Image (tube, helix red, strand yellow):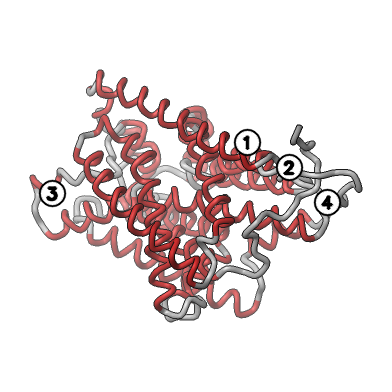
Amino acid sequence: MDTTSAGARARPAPGAVRGRLPLLDVLRGAAILGTLATNIWVFTAPGAEMSLLSGSVQLVDVRGVLSDPSAGAAAEALMRFAANGKFLALLTLLFGAGLAVQFGSAARRGRRWPGRYTWRALFLFVEGTVHFILVFAWDVLMGYAVASLVAAWVLTRSARVRSAVMWGAGALHAAVMGLLTWALAAAPTAVAGSGPSPEVVRLYAEGAYTEQVAARLQNAAVLRIEPVLTFFLLLFLFLAGVRLLRAGAFDPGPAGAALRTRLLAWGLGAGVPLNAATTLAGDAFFLVDRYMAAPVVALGLVGLVGTLLDRSGGDGSGPLSRPLACLGRTALTGYVLQNVLATVLCYGFGLGLASRLAGSGPWWVIGLWAGICLFLLAGSVLWLRRFDQGPLEALQKAVLNRIPERERSAGARVSR
C-alpha cells in the first residue's frame, strides 16, 4: 500500500526546479495588477464593498455598451471583461506552483512535509483575517490558507491520488456552480437586486473608518461566502498549478516554450469564446462566467505571458518584465498595499474620490487603476534594490524562522 503520514519527509518530484523561475515572478506581478483591475470598480462604486451584496454592481456588464456606445463605456466594459475572475484564477494557479516549489525545497533540505508549512498557512490565515477586518471585505488570503493545507497534504500522496483529488475537486466545483446557476436562473429577480441602501452609501462616502470595520465584522458571515463557495475551485487550481510546474510550463527552454504555446492556443482559443458567451448570457450566469470560464482563460494567460517573455529573452530583465517580476517577488505586500491605497483614495475617511467623482464617467477609475499600478511597479523595483523581500514577506519569514523545523525521520517516505 502506497501511503505516508502527514509528517512524512518530502521527496522531489520529476520536473522539480531549484533555481528561481523568472516567468513565475512576472506572472505573479501581472496577476496582482489584474486583480486590482476588477476590484477598482468595487472601491469606486456607491456602497463599495457592500454593493456586491445588493447586486447593484456587476463586475462585468458588456451589454451596457448597447445602451451607451461611447468610448468610455466600451473601455469600461472591455476592462471589466478582461479582468473578471481571470487574474484571480491565475493568482491561484501560481499559488499552487509556489506550493510545489516549497515542497521541493523541503525535500532537498531533508525537512518534514507539511512540517513548518502548516505554520506558514496559519500565518497566512491570520494575515488574511487582519486584511479582511481592517482593509478589504473580499480578501482571498483566508481561503488560500485553508485550501493550501489540504493541497499540501495531497502532495504527499501518490500521483494517482493527486490526480483523483484534483479532478474530483473540479467536478464538485462544476456541480456546485451548476446548481447555483440553475437556482439563479429560476429566480432572476434575486440576481438583479435593488441597489445599496442610503445607509450603506453613506457609510463609504462619509462614514468613519471604525464604522467600516464594524460593518465588515457584522456582515462577516456573508462577506466570507466567496472562499466557501469556491473551495473546490481553489483546491483544483492549486493542484493544477503543481502539475503545470512539474510539467515544465514555467521552465525556460524549448520544452517549456512548446507547452506554453499549447496553453496559449487552448486556453485563449477555448476560454475567450466561452467567457464571452457566459458574459452575454446574463446575470444568472455570473458564477459560471467568473468561476468556470475565467479559469480556462487563466491557463491561456500563462501561455500568453510566457510566450511574450520567451520572445523578449526569457530572463525577466526587460523594461516591462523586470518591474512585473519585482512586484511578483513582493506579491503579498503588493496585494495588500493596492487595497490599502484604494480604500484611502476612494472612501470617505480618506480622499473620498468615489463620492466626489461619482457620475463623471469611467475614465478617472481607469486612471486611478493605472496610477496605483505604476506606484506598485516602481515601488517594488526601488524596494528590492535595498531589500531581498517585501515588508510582509520579511515579516512572515521572521516569524516562521522562530519556529523550529524538524528533520525528516530515517524511515519516513512518500509515495511516488
Mark closest to the chain's N terminus, 1 or 2: 1
> Which residue: 32% across, 31% down?
54
Quarter holding the N terminus?
top right
Q: Which residue is mark 1?
A: 161
The crowd level at tag 3 (other Cα within 10 Å; few <14, some 14-19, many 20+) is some
Whole-number angstrom distance, CA of label 4 to CA of label 1: 31 Å
Find residue 88 and report its horizontal and vertical position in percent: 44, 49
Camera-near label (2 vs 4) is 2
Contact between marks 1 and 2 (CB within 8 A): the answer is: yes
Q: Secondary structure at mark 2?
A: loop
Residue 403's disc is 4
Q: Is residue 189 above or below residue 143?
A: above
Residue 220: image location, x then y, percent: 51, 31
Q: CA distance from mark 1 to mark 2?
A: 10 Å
Give the Cα distance between marks 1 and 3: 47 Å
SS under mark 3: helix
For the point 15% across and 45% down, the residue is 64
Q: Nearer the viewer, mark 4 or mark 1?
A: 1
Q: Earlier in the sequence, mark 1 or mark 3?
A: 3
Cα separation between marks 2 and 3: 54 Å
Q: Amino acid at mark 1?
A: Val
Instruction: Tell us which disc is closer to us: 1 or 3.
Output: 1
Find disc 2 in the rendering and name its residue: 415
Q: Which residue is mark 3?
A: 65
Comes first in the chain, label 3 or label 4:
3
Label 1: which secondary element: helix
